[in-house]
Image (tube, helix red, strand yellow):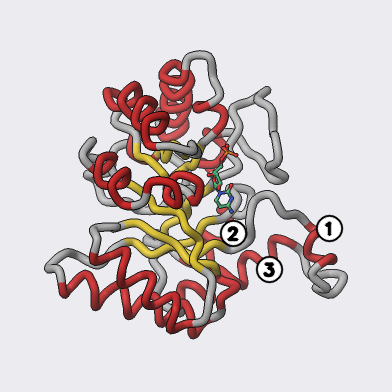
């Protein structure tokens, strides 16, 4: 297996390292897919669309399948507000959630403190708190649009934000698997790298800019892969998820 591979708890199976993004408008659609995929033992990601429509009840139902449920709300506000949001989510049982690095170090530190305090108040282990480095739909051209100086590359930007997240006590980052190798080297084996923008060879990129195959993502050091439309939009979602898990297993050798 690749030297870059991070160390996850041995109890985390290959199948659990696949987060299926349940980007649906309602709980019925999300739970119908989750039920189909349940025998495979994959993890699930609840994003803004589903969470804002259905809230915690759908998260709890998905947690009932026994695997990790990542609540992907990409919190981004002033430190006090983000700390409050993290407190509310953790007290309701969310144990894998994220904020934006662009909220700044004070915001990330406030989120870490709030997560630890809320978890201890309900007698649970601290949740996994992940920071988004740069959305995988963004590329070099967008950095220029944000007025970053010529010469600042996506890779440099993402590395810088990942290190900052680590210093603030975050458990890991969301990043493109294209940047996973450098981040793994800089941030060490225990830092979680959650990578969306995954496309099996030949699949449509859709609105993602920096895509990579499941096998390559793991070889680059990803801890968890996030896959949405290649599974949710497939004629046979279970077959699609099975084939991605088989590719992951092959890559992890
Ligand atoms: O359908 P697709 O595989 O492109 O879905 C990717 C998922 O990962 C979406 O739910 C999207 O919100 C999420 N995501 C992303 N890029 C990030 C962070 C999260 O695509 N940087």
| Quarter of image, res 103 | bottom right
134 with respect to 93 (left or right):
right
Q: Earlier in the sequence, mark 3 or mark 2?
A: 3
Q: Look at 55% across and 24% down and name the residue there.
A: 233
Image spot of residue 178 (x, y percent): 63, 48
Q: Look at 41% across and 70% down and name the residue there.
A: 170
Q: Which mark is residue 63?
A: none
Q: Which one is nearer the viewer's eye here, 56 or 228?
A: 56
Q: Look at 39% across and 59% down and name the residue there.
A: 97
Q: Which mark is residue 182?
A: 2
* The C terminus, quarter of image: top left
Image spot of residue 215 (x, y percent): 53, 33
**Element class at badge 3:** helix
Q: Earlier in the sequence, mark 3 or mark 1?
A: 1
Report crowding for label 3: few under 14, some 14 to 19, many 20 or more residues within 10 A (C-alpha).
some
| Picture quarter with ligand 1 | top right
The residue pinned by badge 3 equals: 157
3 and 1 marks in contact (CB < 8 Å): no
Q: Is mark 1 within 8 Å of ligand 1?
A: no
Between marks 1 and 2, how big is the CA–CA gap?
21 Å
Q: Nearer the viewer, mark 3 or mark 2?
A: 3
Q: Look at 69% across and 27% down and name the residue there.
A: 204
Image spot of residue 98 (x, y percent): 44, 62
Between marks 3 and 2, how big is the CA–CA gap?
12 Å
Q: Which one is nearer the viewer's eye here, 76 or 68?
A: 76
The residue pinned by badge 1 equals: 141
* The N terminus, quarter of image: top left
């Amino acid at each position: 297996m690749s030297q870059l591979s991070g160390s996850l708890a041995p109890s985390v199976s290959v199948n659990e390292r696949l987060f299926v993004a349940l980007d649906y408008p309602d709980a019925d659609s999300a739970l119908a897919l989750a039920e189909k995929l349940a025998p495979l033992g994959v993890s699930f990601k609840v994003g803004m669309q589903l969470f804002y429509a259905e809230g915690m009840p759908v998260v709890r139902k998905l947690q009932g399948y026994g695997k990790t449920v990542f609540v992907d709300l990409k919190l981004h506000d002033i430190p006090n507000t983000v700390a409050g949001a993290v407190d509310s989510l953790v007290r309701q049982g969310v144990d894998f959630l994220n904020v934006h690095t662009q909220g700044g170090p004070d915001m990330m530190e406030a989120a870490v403190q709030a997560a630890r305090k809320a978890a201890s108040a309900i007698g649970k282990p601290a949740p996994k708190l992940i920071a988004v480095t740069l959305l995988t739909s963004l590329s070099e051209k967008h950095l220029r649009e944000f007025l970053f100086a010529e010469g600042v590359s996506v890779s440099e930007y993402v590395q810088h934000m990942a290190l900052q997240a680590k210093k603030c006590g975050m458990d890991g980052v969301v990043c493109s698997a294209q940047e996973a190798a450098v981040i793994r080297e800089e941030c060490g084996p225990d830092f979680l790298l959650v990578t969306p923008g995954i496309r099996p060879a030949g699949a449509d990129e859709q609105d993602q800019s920096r895509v990579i195959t499941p096998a390559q993502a793991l070889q680059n050091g990803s801890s968890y892969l996030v896959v949405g439309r290649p599974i949710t939009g497939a004629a046979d979602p279970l077959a699609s998820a099975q084939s991605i898990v088989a590719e992951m297993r092959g890559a992890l050798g």
